[in-house]
Amino acid sequence: MARLSLRFLLLRRLLPAMAGLLAAGAATAYWVAHRSATTAYDRSLLDTALAIVDQLSIVDGKPTLRLTPQARAVLLTDKFDQIFFAVRGPNNELFGGEPGLPLPVGDALESLRTEGRHYYNGTLGGNPLRLAALQAERGGQPVTIVAAETLVKRTALQREIIVGMLLPELLLVLATFMVAWFGIRSGLQPLAGLQRELAGRSHADLSPIATAVPDELQPVVDEINELMGRLEHSLDSQRHFVSDAAHQLRTPIAALQAQVEAALGDASRHNRTQLEGVLAAAHRLSHLVDQLLALARAEPSQPQPLPEIFLENVVHGVAENWLPAAIEKGIDLGFDLQPTVVRGNNFLLQEMLANLVDNALRHTPAGGAVTVACAPKDDGAVLAIDDSGPGIAADEREKVFERFYQSPDSLSDGCGLGLAIVLKIVRQHGGDASIGESPTLGGTRVEISLPAESSSEPD
């Protein structure tokens, strides 16, 4: 489905209506200007007809028009248009002027008789004209005077009005678009603020949204907050279930181990082999339960301020627990630790490191070596675990971080949760984990990058 932009959707709704209003305003302004100019020119044409009426006299009982050359020049000379006139009697007989000028007919003639004057359009020799007809009386006889002119001035005026209005209208359209654009952009700023708040949150932050939004957006924010509340409750229920189940399983598994170990003391050689297999399975089950419990603890919860932690102290604390296992396998467990301060959850960092060391010891053959190193860097800290084991194939290095995934070539009795727990804890601290080849020991190198600052801590 194509994505819709709210900004362009609003513009698409607003601009046609605004353009319609602007067009209507422009048309109204043009009509008013054109009508005013036309009225002025029509009145000037009527003045010509009135001037001709003043030149009429009655000779032998008939209206006679006597125009001197000077008067004719004054009445009929125009800089732009040709001016014509015609004087007709009651029976349309021509007393003077241009015989081809059309007279009013139909409703126009009725308007002339009623009002004494009428303006209309016509043609002379195929050329368009504007005419003014005047009804007058001389010597008791009705006469009709028609004054006409070509449309040069009127056409030029129309063109000047259109050109004069075009640039302001274009500027007004541009200004309207800019006002609408910035108005919509300003109106959508609360959405940008909401987006920034959500983008700045960690995946563990399910607290209610506190950004102020307009009333129209508040129902959406309320629904998001309710959804976050339901999601937080669901995640809490999941964590509690896994944690409770792991705790409940510990007791019967511990009892099973104790009973098998007790039975081994009195078992025959044949039964001892079978019981040792059962004991090994019980140990794996116990380890799986511990890993599930660690995974439940690593699930994100409400963020809290993170304290400063000396990473080398975390390494020392975990290493002491794994020295016996390393000594038992004849593995050289070494350390290269520099003073390194990070912000984090001490318990989860210990859990992460314990899984890394345990994983390295499981995959390193007897007589090998495992080195744990930490050092500060410009934007945080680096924790690296190198081993001399067989390493991890390049196409397997991303998959081993998945839950319950184990390489087909792996001979370890692990459950496939160790590195998944590591990655989850690292991500909660805003860091990242990667796997490569150890440059010093030739086996696997797991490198953890942690940021110098983090705004939240999962419980």
Image (spheres, grey):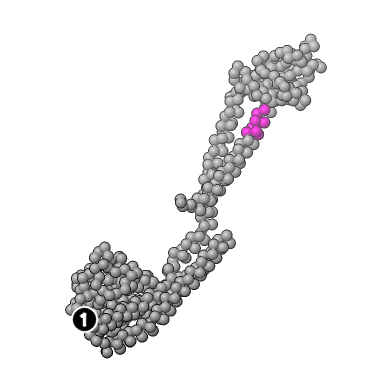
Placement of the C terminus among the 4 image quadrants: bottom left
**Residue at (44, 68) in percent of width and height:** 201
**Residue at (33, 70) in percent of width and height:** 404
Left or right side of 421 for 365: left
Quadrant of res 436: bottom left
**Residue at (60, 38) in percent of width and height:** 27
Q: Is residue 105 visible?
A: yes
Residue 89 percent coordinates (x, y): 75, 15
Question: Which stretch is magenta?
Answer: 34-42
Instruction: Find numbered disc 1 in the image and state the secondary structure of the residue it sits on.
Output: helix
Quadrant of res 142: top right
**In front of the other: 328 or 13:** 328
Assess disc 1: are there few (<14), some (14-19) or many (≥20) residues with their C-alpha within 10 Å of its C-alpha. some
Instruction: Count numbered badges in the picture.
Output: 1
Left or right side of 92 for 383: left
Quadrant of res 442: bottom left
Can residue 36 be found in the magenta stretch?
Answer: yes
**Residue at (19, 78) in percent of width and height:** 366
Can residue 160 be found in the magenta stretch?
Answer: no
Left or right side of 235 for 162: right
Residue 416 percent coordinates (x, y): 31, 72
Q: Is residue 304 visible?
A: no
**In front of the other: 155 or 400:** 400
- Quickly name the residue at label 1: 329
Amino acid at pointer 1? Lys
Residue 284 percent coordinates (x, y): 31, 78
Name, please, the residue furthest toward the top: 60
